[in-house]
Amino acid sequence: MTDLHKSRPSPGPASIRAEIVTDSISPEARTVPIVFTTGAVVRRWRWADDGWSIEEYDERLSLAPGAMRTQFLDSGRAPFLDAHDSRSNDSVIGVIEAGSVKLDERAGRGEAVVRFDDTELAERRFRSVRSGILRNVSVGYNVHTFTETRKADAKKGIVRELLATDWEPLEVSQVPIGADRDAETLLAARAYASQLQATVTTHERGEEMQDHKGTDGAAASQTIDLEAVRREAAQAENVRQIEIRTAARLVKLDESDAVVAEALRSPSMSASAARDAILRRAAERDDATVTRAARGAELGVEESEKRGAAVVQGLMARAHPGQFKITDPEVAHYASRSLLQIAEDALQSRGINTRGISRSQIAELALRRSEVSHARAGGMHSTSDFPLVLADVANKSLRMGYEGAPRTFLPWARRVSASDFQSIKRGPLSGGLALAQVPEGGEFTRGTTHEARESYAIKTYGKIVAITRQVLINDDLDAFSRVPFIYGAAAADLESDTVYGVLGNNAALADGVALFHATHANLGTPGAPSVTTLGEARKMMRRQTDLDASRLLNLQGRYLIVPAALETTIDQLLAQTTPAQSSQVTPEFIRSLVPIVEPRLDDFSATAWYLAAESGRIDTIEFAYLAGEEGVQLETRSGWEVDGVEVKARLDFGAAAIDHRGMVKNAG
């Protein structure tokens, strides 16, 4: 390994006069020792599982032996970038010297040596490093394995900590501020004066040096022609560089390539060794296009993901003002920009120059997904891709509309999941379950059951929203925010329509009798909700039996379901007042009822009301979603019929009455 505190430049042309020794930084070789990680804890963030809030967590790189994969960083091919900019070769300002990487667990740091290029940008950065102005560096890496722990935080409570126990550095960058505040260039001294050490003892210029005495005792002397030595070395170096350039041209590599440049600048590397390195570099180049794209996408993943989240938050704040509080300046920035301006920002972040491109072309290009993201994820796309940012806004708006719409059936109806679209056969097992006496020496009798025959199936409902070039050019934010919001509310309304349709239509069950019927003993004497009519409904529910009438179920009414026309009546009935007479006191069972006001019932009857038991005690009306697809779902794809992105809202849902005994109806 290279000693970071005594790094030496590559040897110059052969000379017997002197060698150059410098301290810590070598202006001649343009090398600088760095600490690229100290394993510091870095606070990061991600979207929480609820899709709305942001969860903070800590990330730390393990410095234990074997935790870091050093092959690439230590190969001499790892770039030293300007501020993690992996989009252009112009941002490569140096290279990590081969064999210089060292991970010191005891010292708590990873070290390496950087050699700066001599381009204009690299030269400016090198001067700033030498003067002590730029000292911070940051490492770009992939994590293959995390170990998760949880720790207490004074401000945040319990915070997750992810320890990278298998990680691979891919580049190091010169940055203004790094995540690891202790990663920096090592400048052990500010003195760069060279110290020349004589390797031979000389007299005055042109004098002879005593070498040895001959056997005859005569003094033999020798004069060293230093100029001849220099000319010979320069000629040999010239031949070596010609051979290297010839080899590079044959495989179509120019001198800006890191391997070729390193060979030209390293006189100690023979022409044969340089040719081998150039051939390996050409072979890697031929099959590394996708790999480079994938690596480049990974290096800036944190920044791109953060930018994508800021765009989503900004657009949500703009689409739904008053519901989102903006505290982040970057979010505020995107909330104030048009869709086309944000699209242009997205293209520039992918390295696409938008100068001179029309508004229509900007919209068209932005609606194409990033090829780099596609290569990186093996077909998956980064959430910072502009089409997916718009789809994320549409999805969140859809969920807001869906979850914000009132669904009054949720407290009293029973929810299940269906594995497919085939008929669901449902119903309680009841009848013949009462325990029977066993005479002495007699046998236990077997209970009989009657499996209910109620069945129904879930159905699929859906709509497609198109996000087109016209949407971006016209800055039509409603097209993928307000419209999905309305679709979400419509999906929730469809669920309510389905469930209350079962209640209001009073269709026949599998026994051929209407859900509410005198035969089912669940149809009360008509009258408005009162102590008398509710008392009757209460009694009817308690007197329900199992299917063979072998035992009483003793059910208790819990929910009072009424149309909007009876809402005031119910408020008055359930109000806690001080009556003039004890006979006017509202019974406790009425005060304990949970009122459910549903305006859809007015379409069937403005006077009819219902009493329902807890769905966990007995089946009433059941509703089902497709397993794994609960609630309204959203899918996106690149448009085929339209020039843009299509967002599809889909709902798989069904409902049916399962048992008549847990509900009572009064026609009012």
Image (cartoon, helix red, strand yellow):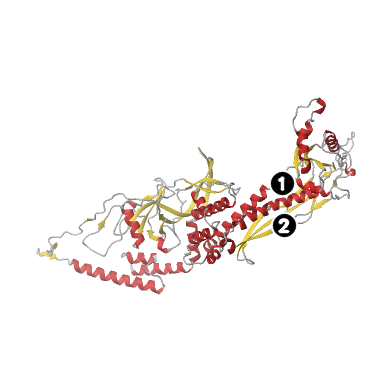
Q: Height in image: 638 above or below 314?
A: below
Q: For numbered disc 2, what is the local secondary structure?
A: strand
Task: Find out whether the residues at labels 2 and 1 contact each other: C-beta distance under 8 Å.
Answer: no
The residues bearing labels 2 and 1 have C-alpha atoms spaced at a distance of: 17 Å
Label 2 vs label 1, nearer the camera:
1
Which is nearer the eye, 315 or 122? 315
Q: Height in image: 141 above or below 119?
A: above
The picture quadrant where one finds residue 20 is: bottom left
Percent position of residue 69, x then y: 46, 55
Percent position of residue 197, x then y: 21, 56
For mark 1, what is the residue? 407
The picture quadrant where one finds residue 232 is: bottom left
Percent position of residue 341, x then y: 51, 59
Which numbered disc, 2 or 1, marks the residue that appears first in the sequence?
1
The residue drawn where x is 84% and y is 44% is 660
For mark 2, what is the residue? 461
Q: Amino acid at mark 2?
A: Tyr
Bin the neighbour count of mark 1 within 10 Å (Cα to Cα): few under 14, some 14-19, many 20 and up. Answer: some
Q: Amino acid at mark 1?
A: Arg
Asked if residue 647 can be seen in this view, the reply is: yes
Q: Residue furthest top?
A: 581
Percent position of residue 389, x then y: 57, 56
